Amino acid sequence: MSVWLQKILCNGWVRKNRKNSDAYLKPVILRFSKDLKGKLNMTGNIYQEAMSRLDQAAAYADIDPEAVLKLKHPKACLQVSIPVRMDDGSLKIFTGFRVHHNDVRGPTKGGIRFHPDVSLDEVKSLAFWMTIKCAVVGIPFGGGKGGVIVDPKSLSRLELERLSRGYIEQVANFIGPDVDIPAPDVYTNAMIMGWMMDEYSKIARCLSPAVITGKPIPLGGSLGREDATARGGYYCIKEIEKKRKWDPRQIRVAVQGFGNAGQHIADMLYQDGYQIVAISDSKGGIYRQQGFDVPSIVHVKNSSKELQAVYCEGSVCQLVEAEIITNEQLLELDVDLLIPAALENQITGENAAKIKASVIVELANGPTTVDADAILQKKSVLVVPDILANAGGVTVSYFEWVQNKSGYYWRLETIDERLKEIMLREFNNVYELMESHQVHMRTAAYIHALNRQAEAVVALGTQSYFSSQPHSEQAKRASVQEKV
Ligand code: NAD
């Protein structure tokens, strides 16, 4: 039986609540075998890159090889077709994915991305990074991820709701509060998480807030989840500020991507006096040597969807002088701190040599390629890797899940305090490993994660355990036990 099918059958409620569960499962299984069979061995670039980083780090980590072997194979991958009735009456079929990468440390956890470039290969890589990320910050989850190939900006609100609910209908057997717990990612938000939780609860015939995190507060969301990804990165930056004795007023910052992660980090740093000199979104960027008034730009971006160089007093906003730049130019600006907060593969072998920032804090997942890493290391650029820098999001998602499961909700101060404690502890653990092993911070973060991952794998037994006791010795013991 495939792992995928086992997974479905593990979901007790399907058996309990679906009168004819075989009939219900059949179309999904057929679709799985037809569409996905040939694609499970996909070896696209981004996944290969992720695996080569794993190999690099594993060479430094003194761990059981079985832990690395298991990480190289995602536990299960699901591809689905989602029929959506459009506003004009037509029917469109969207393709979606959900991947469970590894669940040895806990149920799989990871966001759902709505983007035209989503692919199974990308989702597999993102799921792998989630396994590593949860281990870096020591939270009891494995890695998962999901996505739908769609340009959500082209959908009406009603179409977006139907697509979100349709996705859950197709993956409902594959997720669950103790199995796999989705969350928001690029172009998905709290409202979408609310629709998805509601749809899952209808299918499961019981209110299941713990099936998904990043929900609106009235639907069981957690205080502090909205800005948690940025806040985790912010705590990392505050540690660097101490180590490098930075005066925030002298530090020039460029932020690529101005959505959830980008807006919140820009605002947090601005409030501390950092100069936010460049910001961009998918359409391009703006640069101003004297720095921007970030709250004004956030206000206009969220009300008009346009990124504009503005200064607002109350509700009256006026344009300020600024240069229009491309996303590529933003990365190469003369700044001290560069924060990629958009998509993967932005800093590459092509442009890494031109990067002038001395510190990069990766709020986006996978913004730096393997060849770029080598160049940045030679230039002594400190890169705080995604698996640490943006782990605040999954950490507060974990808090949300704990609150949903216990039905007891925490104050914002408690959440921030607990997030800060985890981020500072793990940032400093990784920093110490970086110094003691003389490696760059990404490798140090992988070593840290691999140690935790390996502890769990070893606890279940590996070859070194099972083959260390001679068979005859085992047989003798068994016969003694039988006699007793
Ligand atoms: P979002 O949808 O809120 O915002 C994405 C932003 O990136 C938008 O401003 C968009 O215009 C911009 N963008 C899209 N394509 C771009 C391009 N080619 N160049 C420059 N900008 C572009 O998404 P988000 O939640 O802020 O996620 C951003 C990154 O952070 C992603 O890599 C995501 O995986 C990662 N991340 C997010 C969370 C979270 O909790 N939201 C957690 C961990 C990691």
Image: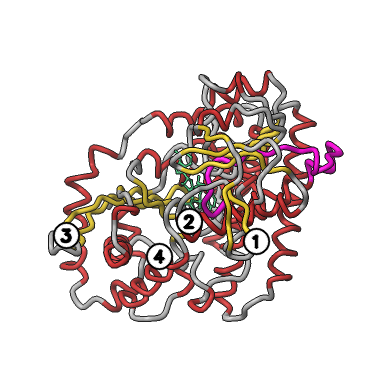
Amino acid marked by disc 4: Ile
SS of the residue under disc 1:
strand
Question: x, y percentage for residue 140?
Answer: 59, 58
Query: How much space separates mark 3 and mark 4, taking CA atoms?
Result: 26 Å
Q: Residue at x 72, y 40 (%)?
A: 430
**Magenta residues, start to end:** 239-261
Query: Is residue 420 magenta-colored?
Result: no
Q: Earlier in the sequence, mark 4 or mark 1?
A: 4
Q: Is residue 193 above or below residue 411?
A: above
Q: Residue lying farthest left? A: 90
Q: Are marks 4 and 1 in contact (CB under 8 Å)?
A: no
In the shown orientation, is residue 135 left or right of residue 196?
A: right
Query: How much space separates mark 1 and mark 2, taking CA atoms?
Result: 45 Å
Query: Is residue 252 magenta-colored?
Result: yes
Residue position for label 2:
108
Q: Which mark's residue is nearer the viewer, 4 or 1? A: 1
Amino acid marked by disc 3: Pro
Q: Residue at x 69, y 75 (%)?
A: 411
Callout 1: 10 Å neighbours few (<14), some, many (20+)? few
Q: Earlier in the sequence, mark 3 or mark 4?
A: 3
Residue position for label 4:
192
Q: Earlier in the sequence, mark 2 or mark 4?
A: 2
Query: How much space separates mark 2 and mark 3, taking CA atoms?
Result: 25 Å
Residue position for label 1:
313
